[in-house]
Amino acid sequence: MTEKATFGAGCFWGVEAAFRELDGVMDAAAGYAGGHTANPTYKEVCTDRTGHAEVVQVEYDPAKVSYDQLLNLFWDAHDPTQVNRQGPDVGTQYRSVIFFHTPEQEQAARTSKANLDASGRFRRPIATEIQPAQPFYRAEEYHQQYLAKRGLRHCHI
């Protein structure tokens, strides 16, 4: 049986590609969550007026990959101290956010964030939001596996 996890870590292209490389991840879909507009388009999300974050929804087999492993990849995939930005991408749609689907995911996310904050790895505090899962809207097809379709493995920002 698979489970879902949803993460926002800036531009979803590189994050989606990174999750797809993990053994036990059955699917990773680029999309939008956390906003107030139903069925938003990329163009609408880019206006920074819908409230959505670019996210990746991961479907995974917990017998092969743990939620903690997904969290570790999430922390490594971006700078969680940035507020509403990653690299040159600026706006609330690029915020760092974990949308939890279960109480266990919420606890794991909060513990992981606190441990990372206490570790001294970053000079600034972790800005990542932790929120209940919101409706997920799959991004347009041209955003799915965007880097793989172009023969790339990582975003070069």
Image (tube, rainbow, N blue to C red):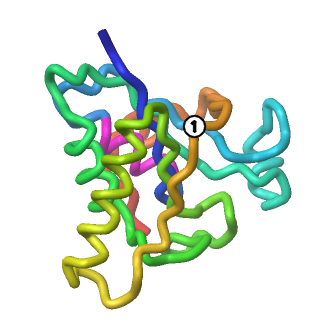
The kind of secondary structure the magenta stretch mainly shows is helix
Which residues lie in the magenta part?
Answer: 12-19
Image-based side of 136 in relation to 68, left or right: right
Q: Secondary structure at mark 1?
A: loop
Q: Nearer the viewer, residue 4 or 151?
A: 4
> Among all residues in the image, which is located at the extreme bottom?
123
Is 129 rendered above or below residue 107? Answer: below
Query: In the image, what residue occupies the spot 33% across and 15% down?
Result: 2
> Among all residues in the image, which is located at the extreme top?
1
Q: Is residue 67 magenta?
A: no
Query: In the image, what residue occupies the spot 42% across and 27% down?
Result: 4
> What residue does disc 1 label?
133
Q: Position of residue 40 (x, y in %)?
A: 79, 37
Is 97 rendered above or below residue 18? Answer: below
Image-based side of 143 in relation to 66, left or right: right
Q: Quadrant of residue 39?
A: top right
Q: Amino acid at mark 1?
A: Ala
